[in-house]
Amino acid sequence: MTKRYAGRTVLITGGGTGLGREMAIAFAQEGAHVCVIGRRAEKLDETVAAIEALEGKALGLTADVRDVARIDEVVKEVRSRTGRIDVLVNNAAGNFVVPSEQLSPNGFKAVVDIVLLGTFNVTRAAFEALRESEGKILNIIATYAWSGEPGAVHSASAKAGVLAMTRTLAAEWGRYGIRANAIAPGPIHTEGTDKNLWSIADIEEHVRARIPLGRLGTPGDVARAATWICSDDAAWISGAALPVDGAHWLGGGTLDFRAAYDAAAGAAQKH
Ligand code: NAP
């Protein structure tokens, strides 16, 4: 079977860990030359080694998405080493839990600078290459971009901005054949979430109970959606925001319907 990304270059921010790393491996397995960027060289090296162990092609370049000059250099280097950029995945993010009234303006700015401004910096730098390739932009957001998230006003505000950016660029750059979409993952254990957001012992059951499909996600769930939505199989999809979350964001509800199901199941067993 032909590999969907043979001869293509995919640039992934935050590709050294978590969902970014899994997406990097998935694109590489489908034939892409993958470039991962992030601040920690050792994490990027791990992703590159994992891809090379599978006989894929990968390149790691350290960069902070807030550093406009460095991002411009990175994009230049990727183009000179691979000749092109076909897919840009804006995945890098920072987050932490804090009641809004205790969040300092600097704390708010730190997250917005990485998530919202960082996404713009890399996208802007990659525009020429994306125009040449009729490329794809995939922004990794979160369902709280539209639902809000108590305890993460900085991240929710930034992700809402990235969602608006996704839709704006889909409308504006469609004329160049560029598609822009977003994936909103649900709860998935990664280095970032486990360290900064929720630990398994604390709230895993609470989270799981609110996921209609009954399990947390895996990085592979997101990676498979990412390789699909950026492929020609999704050629007429642009401006979409795809939840990959087991219907988590719809699952809270107000009514105690689970008890009603349990009672009905009990009654059925008696008959
Ligand atoms: P993660 O492991 O913490 O990944 C975040 C990555 O971003 C890291 O590799 C980090 O690398 C990089 N990064 C952070 N700040 C950066 C900066 N200034 N410049 C360049 N790179 C930077 O977390 P994850 O769970 O995989 O998250 C991936 C994406 O999915 C994020 O956008 C997150 O908001 C989204 N998401 C995740 C979940 C979930 O449950 N896992 C749910 C909804 C949305 P360095 O520190 O080395 O720079």
Image: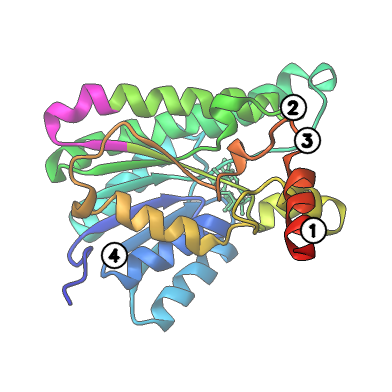
Residue in view at x 57 percent, y 62 percent: 218
Q: Are marks 3 and 4 in contact (CB under 8 Å)?
A: no
Question: Dividing the image into 4 quarters, which one contains the C terminus?
Answer: bottom right
Q: Which residue reaches farthest front? A: 271
Identify residue for label 2.
150
For the residues labelled 3 and 2, the Cα–Cα distance comes to: 9 Å
**Label total for image:** 4
Identify residue for label 4.
33
Is 179 in the magenta? yes
- The residue mark sitting in front, 1 or 3, is 1
Identify residue for label 3.
97
Instruction: Report the amino acid beneath label 1.
Output: Gly
Q: Earlier in the sequence, mark 3 or mark 2?
A: 3
Instruction: Report the amino acid beneath label 2.
Output: Pro
Q: Please state if 224 lies on the left or on the right of 33 as rendered.
A: right
Q: Range of the magenta residues?
A: 170-180
In x, y percent, where is residue 260?
76, 44
Q: Earlier in the sequence, mark 1 or mark 3?
A: 3
Question: Dividing the image into 4 quarters, which one contains the N terminus?
Answer: bottom left
In this view of the protein, can residue 269 be seen by the observer?
A: yes
Q: Earlier in the sequence, mark 3 or mark 4?
A: 4
Q: Are marks 1 and 2 in contact (CB under 8 Å)?
A: no
Residue in view at x 73 percent, y 30 percent: 254
